[in-house]
Amino acid sequence: MFKKFEKYLKFVVLLTLSSLTFAQVPPEFEHNQSQNQGGYLFRSADIDGILLEEDDWIGAFNGDICVGARQWNLSTCLGNLCEIVVMGSDDTEFTAGYLQIGDIPTFKVYDASENRYYLATPSENIPYAGNLSYQDINSISVIDDCA
C-alpha cells in the first residue's frame, strides 16, 4: 500500500514541477504567497486588440498591492485559459492589504517587449469569493498606460 502511495506522490510532485514557470517575475508583480488563494480564469488578453505574447504578464492588485501574477504563456496554461491565482488575506503580516471576500481586484498587464506596465480592464468585475474560489472572465484588455 505504501509503495502505491509513494509512486502517486512522486507523480504529483513531478506534475506540479513540470507546470511551474521559472521566468523572472516583473518587479511590480512580486507578491507573497498566502494560505487563502482564489483565482480568475481569462480566455483572452490583449493590448489595443493585439493578443498578449508568451513573455507578457498579468498582475492582480488590491489597491496598489500586488496580490497575484501570471506569465501569459498559453503552453503552460489550461489550454486557452490562463489562470491568475490571487492571494487573500490570511491574517499574517505577509498578507496585510491582500484581498478580503467581496473585494474586486484590479489588473495590470506587463508588456515585456516594451518593458511597460498598463492598466487593464476585465470584461466583468467579479469580487474575490475567498479561498479556493475560481471566477471565469472572458477577456482582459489594456485601457490606459500606467507607467
Image (cartoon, rainbow, N blue to C red):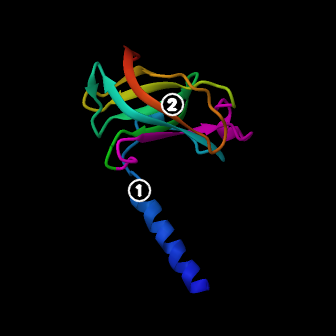
Residue 71 vertical position relative to residue 107 in the rendered view, above or below: below
Residue closest to the eye, 65 or 7: 7
Which x, y percent locates residue 54? 29, 40
- At x 38%, y 47%, the residue is 77
- At x 40%, y 36%, the residue is 26
Which quadrant does the C terminus fall into? top left
Q: Is residue 98 magenta?
A: yes
What span is in magenta? 76-100
Find disc 1 in the rendering and name its residue.
19
Residue 4 vertical position relative to residue 80 in the rendered view, above or below: below
Query: What type of secondary structure mainly makes up the magenta span?
Result: loop
Residue closest to the eye, 24 or 100: 100
Which x, y percent locates residue 59? 46, 32
Find disc 2 in the rendering and name its residue.
60
Quarter where residue 128 is shown: top right
Residue closest to the eye, 113 or 7: 7
Which x, y percent locates residue 27? 43, 34
- At x 59%, y 45%, the residue is 33
